[in-house]
Image (spheres, rainbow, N blue to C red):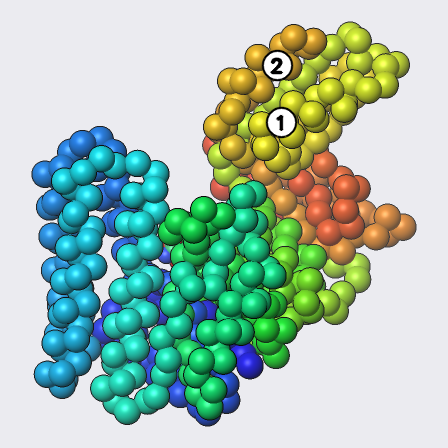
Amino acid sequence: MKVLKFGGTSVGSAERMKNLVALIRSNEPKIVVLSAMSGTTNALVEISNALYAKENNKAKTLIDSLEKKYESVLKELYSKESSMNKGKELVKNHFEFIRSFTLDMFTANEEKAILAQGELLSTAIEHFYLEEIGIDSVLLPALNFMRIDKNDEPDMKYIEENLKAELKKHSGKNLFITQGYICRNAFGETDNLKRGGSDYTATIIGAALSAEEIQIWTDIDGMHNNDPRIVEKTFPVTELSFDEAAELAYFGAKILHPTCVLPAQKRKVPVRLLNTMQPQAKGTVITDKIQTDRITAVAAKDGIIAIKIKSARMLLAYGFLRNVFEIFERYKTPIDMITTSEVAVSVTIDNDKNLDSIIKELQEFCTVEIDKDQTIVCVVGNFSADKLGYASRILDSLKNIPIRMISYGGSENNISVLVDSKYKKDALISLNKGLFGL
Ligand code: ADP
Ligand code: ASP
Ligand code: MG
């Protein structure tokens, strides 16, 4: 079994939905995971924001215009009346459901139900198209098997059992279509795997079935050595280890959802990143093969908050760091970077939900300084401690950029620096020059 995931742009228009057929029509068994059509999830977020703000007329206008977009996709996609009727019925039902929220209370649960509509629409629309052109496919409802636990982690045991049970219902079939991103939570409610989560769906399914391969089809020819949205000259990296890919995804390489590498890594299922617009391009393959001694790529993660925690009591004391970490643990706030000196420790977080409470508790035993709008610039590769020169090459490349923190030696795969977000672009360009000569 292979798992193939197609992102928003890959299903972003009627034409793209038609082009998908060439990539999925072979007879080998496969599960195809689809995202919502590009722009849909953003539009659903905008609708939800209007509903939160009780701007119901604005929400209605946004809903109407999104519905019109879908109606025109149907017209372009289907040529048979029977598929057209099915498509119209589908779109009508989903938009009636979205519209129903303009009449009632709006909370986070309703928002999650709205956000799920994009993937439910794209998968059914593609499924009807395959039916129209005579390709047999099964629409697998992700909400019947994809589930997160109370810590928002995928419930792998539940997923494996229920996915296998769903597949068993259709023995002899080879082509399955399912929704990325959406799932149920520990209470059985509709939920999601966070933005970009369709990648995660694909790797969770791939791991649950110990698939032969997971393919992530997107709009670029693999993982590039630097952020192509910011830096002009970048190139695809043909091979990555799971560790390198996990660091790049976590530290901002948008091509992969931040935690989607982990399930594939656990079961050693190779992940291939491929380009829908250029299917012959080699792309990137992610495996457990490690290439030693190299600088592989650079990524950047925005929205970081630096917290400097200072206390004279830290000097020669033990137990201080534990007290600090316990506070972050209590508020379920992960720390990304950490640097220490004799009297101070600086940490970074990317989630300010409980920042005020964390500061208050820290202030009971130390002074606290906060810097917002920071960016972690992360250089990923394989830097064994006995090799010379990596840190100096990185720091030399960044000699004209003010650096707030440096983290080196935490793992052999990552050297990170923290800069004010206003220096991010310069930092990425300087590293491209200094490390890759571009
Ligand atoms: P999809 O909708 O298919 O999931 P995404 O927009 O989530 O696609 O991810 C693909 C995009 O990720 C690319 O178009 C590119 O702009 C961006 N990106 C950011 N960093 C990288 C990188 N290091 N390599 C490749 N793409 C990257
Ligand atoms: N549709 C969702 C999003 O836009 C999930 C995904 O595309 O991966 O975030
Ligand atoms: Mg994505």
Instruction: Establish if 47 lies above or below 373.
Output: below
Q: Give coordinates of residue 67: x percent, y percent.
A: 15, 58
Q: Give coordinates of residue 288: x percent, y percent.
A: 72, 67
* Ligand 2 neighbours mark 1 (CB distance < 8 Å): no
Q: Give coordinates of residue 49: x percent, y percent.
A: 26, 37
Q: Is residue 359 visible?
A: yes
What residue is rendered at 20% in x and 51% in y? 98
What residue is rendered at 13% in x and 77% in y? 84
Instruction: Establish if 427 lies above or below 167.
Output: above
Q: Earlier in the sequence, mark 1 or mark 2?
A: 1
Tell me the mark number nearer the camera, choosing from 1 and 2. 1
159 left or right of 316 in image: left
Residue identified by numbered label 1: 330
What label sits on residue 361 in the rendered view?
2
- Which quadrant of the render holds ligand 2? bottom left
Q: Residues within 10 Å of mark 1 (few under 14, many from 20)?
A: few
Instruction: Establish if 344 lies above or below 91.
Output: above
What residue is rendered at 76% in x and 56% in y? 382
Q: Give coordinates of residue 135: x percent, y percent.
A: 32, 89
Q: Is residue 423 visible?
A: no
What residue is rendered at 30% in x and 77% in y? 127
Q: Are marks 1 and 2 in contact (CB under 8 Å)?
A: yes
How far apart are labels 1 and 2 at the CA level? 11 Å
Amino acid marked by disc 1: Arg
Q: Nearer the viewer, residue 97 or 253?
A: 97
Instruction: Establish if 80 lies above or below 290.
Output: below
54 left or right of 418 in image: left
399 left or right of 390 in image: left
